Amino acid sequence: MKKFFFFAAIAAMALVACDPETEENKGGKEEEGGIKLEYRIKTLDGKPFTYDAEGRIVSYGNDYEIRTLIYEGNKVTIKDKWRDETTDPWSEEIVEYELTLNEQGFATEVKYGDNNVVTITYDKDGFFTEAKKNGEKITGQTIEDNNVMAWERYDSKNDYWRQKKATYLDKDNVGQVQTHWAEDLGMKRWMHEARFFGNTSVKVLETCRWYNYGDEPAASTAVYDYEYDANGCITKETKYYGEWNETDLTGLDFDDEHTFTWEKI
């Protein structure tokens, strides 16, 4: 059977092309870790992803800024160019990131800027568990039942001091949106949605909240609301922030919003 490499780079995990007459392939393929991949991201915040014949992302952007991805074996170079107005000429294309991928298509090393190198470790199910920048640990993730339950922040002495803990809805994360992503990894949201940094939670994120030293909760909670398409994929993610009464969004302030569209693999 023909293998597709899903999403970013040789993408997330090898998928077996669906044969409508083969019972085991109906509805996508159940991978190690319980991740079922049936759809791939088409647009994020209105900006389209484009794919090559192998299912690898080769560009992401719009008329004002676009990133081009170039593959050489397990290496990916991401180049960026932009312009202020559609009538202006494009800027010179620059190298933004250089990635090294593992067999699952996840980045184990990211080079960017002035000699910055981020190295990332994954567990057997394709979830990232630890990241270091120039040799110093910058973040990690705690995984339970194929959900990202928390990610860590470190102080200037490289000591753990905060965790952002998550709760989940009893709803499958059909499109594999990466809402609870480790911001301290230092990478852009589109790169997470392109699945460069491993699998995400199998359930839909409900809330996340900072805890100092593991058990001292912050006063405010980030609470998420969603819209879905007919296939159950998230089409709109709205983040609210404030003191939550755990019954509704009353009293919470709008914080952030993202939109998505999807296509069948």
Image (tube, rainbow, N blue to C red):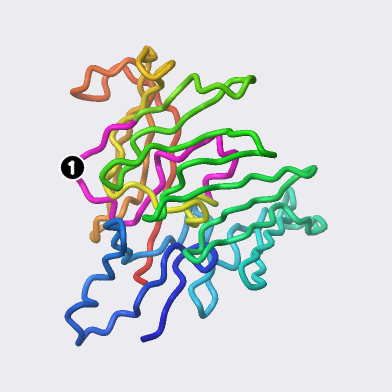
The residue located at (38%, 37%) in the rendering is 142
Q: Position of residue 165 (x, y in %)?
A: 36, 28
Q: Is residue 45 visible?
A: no
Q: Is residue 176 magenta?
A: yes
Compared across the picture, whether 138 is left or right of 2 comes to: right
Q: Tell me the crowding category of disc 1: few under 14, some 14 to 19, or many 20 or more residues within 10 angstroms, Cα based.
A: few
Queried whether the magenta region covers residue 51, the answer comes back as no
Q: Position of residue 195 (x, y in %)?
A: 47, 56
Q: Quadrant of residue 155?
A: top right
Quarter-wise, where is residue 256 in the image? top left
Question: Circle 1 sits in a helix, a strand or a loop, which is it?
Answer: strand
Q: Is residue 120 left or right of residue 142?
A: right
Q: Residue at x 69, y 45 (%)?
A: 117
Residue at position x 32%, y 50% from top? Answer: 234
For mark 1, what is the residue? Answer: 170
Residue in front for this viewpoint, 75 or 179 = 75
Against 241, residue 171 (above or below) is below
Which image quadrant: the C terminus? bottom left
* Image quadrant containing the N terminus: bottom left
At which x and y percent is residue 224?
Answer: 33, 34
Query: Is there any visible trace of residue 111 in the rendered image?
Result: yes
Q: Quadrant of residue 156?
A: top right
Which contiguous range is marked in magenta? 166-190
Q: Please, what is the three-letter code of the amino acid marked with disc 1?
A: Asp
Q: Is 28 placed left or right of 191 in the picture? A: left
Q: Image height check: is 175 above or below 216? A: below
Horizontal and vertical percent position of residue 99: 64, 57
| Residue 83 shown left or right of residue 224 in the figure | right
- Across the whole image, how many numbered discs are drawn on residues? 1
